[in-house]
Amino acid sequence: MKRQIDCKNLSLGYGSKIVLSGLNFSVSEGDFLCIVGENGSGKSTLMKTLLGLQKALGGEIKFDGLKPSDIGYLPQQTPAQRDFPASVREIVLSGFTAKMGLRPFYSATEKKSAENNMKKLGIESLSSKCYRELSGGQQQRVLLARALCSAEKILLLDEPVTGLDPQAQAEMYEIIKNLNKSGVTIIMISHDVNSIVKYSTHVLSLGKNTFFFGSVNDYINKNIDKNINKNKNFRGGDTLHE
Ligand SMILES: Nc1ncnc2c1ncn2[C@@H]1O[C@H](COP(=O)(O)OP(=O)(O)OP(=O)(O)O)[C@@H](O)[C@H]1O
Ligand SMILES: [Mg+2]
């Protein structure tokens, strides 16, 4: 598959504070990469650096055949953001703002595409509702629909199911899996071992002094995460596309 992102000897951090260094990994079209690691290990910082929101302290990130507008982002949620006073439709449409330049209105194509993305995520009936009146699971779908409007090639998802009940988590994972099957490359931060093993093709594990990057099979077989019980069939019959 075609290489989309190549990171070599990457160092990340804030000013003089180095969070991670010597990081090497790559992402190809159709991959489902899970990023794992303890709190504070630098997962969100890595996503912000890939997005160009944060400058790399060293090394290089190469994008192959990608424009910045090909990458969509679902940030890690904070309670304040859950209180946003706008309608679902407005929030989903705002995914297009980066592409609009100085144009002060959404085009017919953008409106159509926002409707399609709301349908894909099963939230079209909520489109006139106020975002802050939705459940956590509904809010996450709205933000995912927004990310899809901003880009359809690669989605960066920072803990997309955190705070959701098990049913809403399962639905969110199904949606993400289907987006991946339809050709969208997924890079997802997750703390949930079962979902990593079930959905991802590759894993990047950020430790204090050690990194792992490889296929999900290697991640399991090399015992990178001691919490994975290899005797259990976590796969649940899902096929892996490598
Ligand atoms: N804006 C910032 N300025 C300075 N340091 C920061 C900033 N944001 C994060 N850090 C620090 O960088 C380190 C990595 O933070 P980051 O948010 O990337 O971790 P994380 O792996 O996403 O953690 P979590 O699982 O809790 O979300 C932490 O030590 C954190 O305190
Ligand atoms: Mg984080």
Image (tube, grey):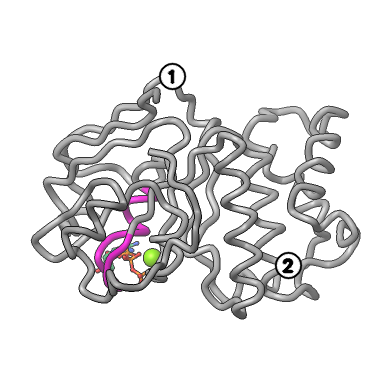
The stretch drawn in magenta includes residue 144 = no
* Residue on which disc 1 sits: 65
Q: Is residue 182 left or right of residue 49?
A: right
Question: Relative to 149, is 29 above or below?
Answer: above
Q: Quadrant of residue 42?
A: bottom left
Q: In which quarter of the image is residue 225?
A: bottom left
- Tell me where residue 71 appears, x and y as whole percent: 51, 37
Residue at position x 58%, y 41% from top? 181
The quadrant in which the N terminus is found is: top left
Question: Relative to 68, is 158 above or below?
Answer: below
- Tell me where residue 56 appears, x and y as whole percent: 25, 42
Residue at position x 35%, y 36% from top? 27
* Disc on res. 138: 2
At mark 2, the secondary structure is helix
> Nearer the N terminus, badge 2 or badge 1?
1
Splitting the image into four quadrants, where does ligand 1 fall? bottom left
Q: In which quarter of the image is residue 96?
A: top right
- Tell me where residue 77 appears, x and y as whole percent: 54, 68
Tell me the amino acid under the disc marked 1: Gly
Q: Residues within 10 Å of mark 1 (few under 14, many from 20)?
A: few
The stretch drawn in magenta includes residue 37 = yes
Residue range of the region highlighted in magenta in the rendering: 36-48
